[in-house]
Amino acid sequence: MKRLFIVSIVAVWTMLAFAQEKKKFSPEQFIAELEQYVTQEARLTPQEAAKFFPLYREQMKKQRPLHQKMRRLSKNKPADENGCLVAIQECDKLDMEMKQLQIEYHKKMLEVLPASKVYDAIKAVDKFHRRQLKRWAHHKNSHLSQ
């Protein structure tokens, strides 16, 4: 009887573990959700979205390596003062490069959309990212407490 009870408990735990299997991050799904959200929040027409998102994707593609370099630099603190100085200077340089790309792409976006639509789209992108970060943090915290 004890064995049957233990086997039943193990079976239930196994089923629960499979039922709560972690969802893997899908970049394609993330981008689709972002574009849908931005389109709705900024009230972009299909024609406006067709002009905005290729520029946005191009900007992100160019900024991604800069973000990766920055992440690598900030991951481990250098062992000495000179190393810290170099890391700070390199991060500042990367920040400037990212800001220059942002300015360049905002100009391109303003050539194809009214300023109010570009403004709303930029705000919607920021809002979407903040919302996703909160969702991931909540999801992570809820799994840790179980």
Image (tube, rainbow, N blue to C red):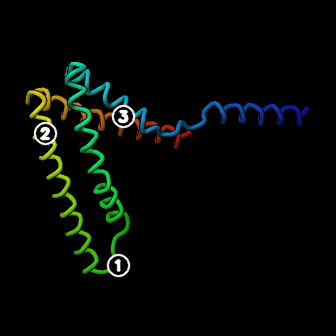
The numbered mark, 3 or 1, whose residue comes first in the sequence reads 3
Residue 21 position (above or below residue 95): above
Q: Residue at x 81, y 31 (%)?
A: 8
Mark linked to residue 79? 1
The numbered mark, 3 or 2, whose residue comes first in the sequence reads 3
Residue at the disc numbered 3: 31
Q: Residues within 10 Å of mark 1 (few under 14, many from 20)?
A: few
Structural distance between the alpha carbons of marks 3 and 2: 21 Å
Quarter placement of the N terminus: top right
The amino acid sitting under disc 3 is Ile
Q: Residue at x 84, y 32 (%)?
A: 5
Residue 75 x/y as whole percent = 37, 63
Residue 76 x/y as whole percent = 37, 68
Task: Tell me if label 3 and label 2 are in contact, CB under 8 Å.
Answer: no
Residue at the disc numbered 2: 108
| Discs 2/1, front | 2
Pick the front one: 125 or 52: 52
The amino acid sitting under disc 1 is Ala
Horizontally, is 30 left or right of 23 in the view? left
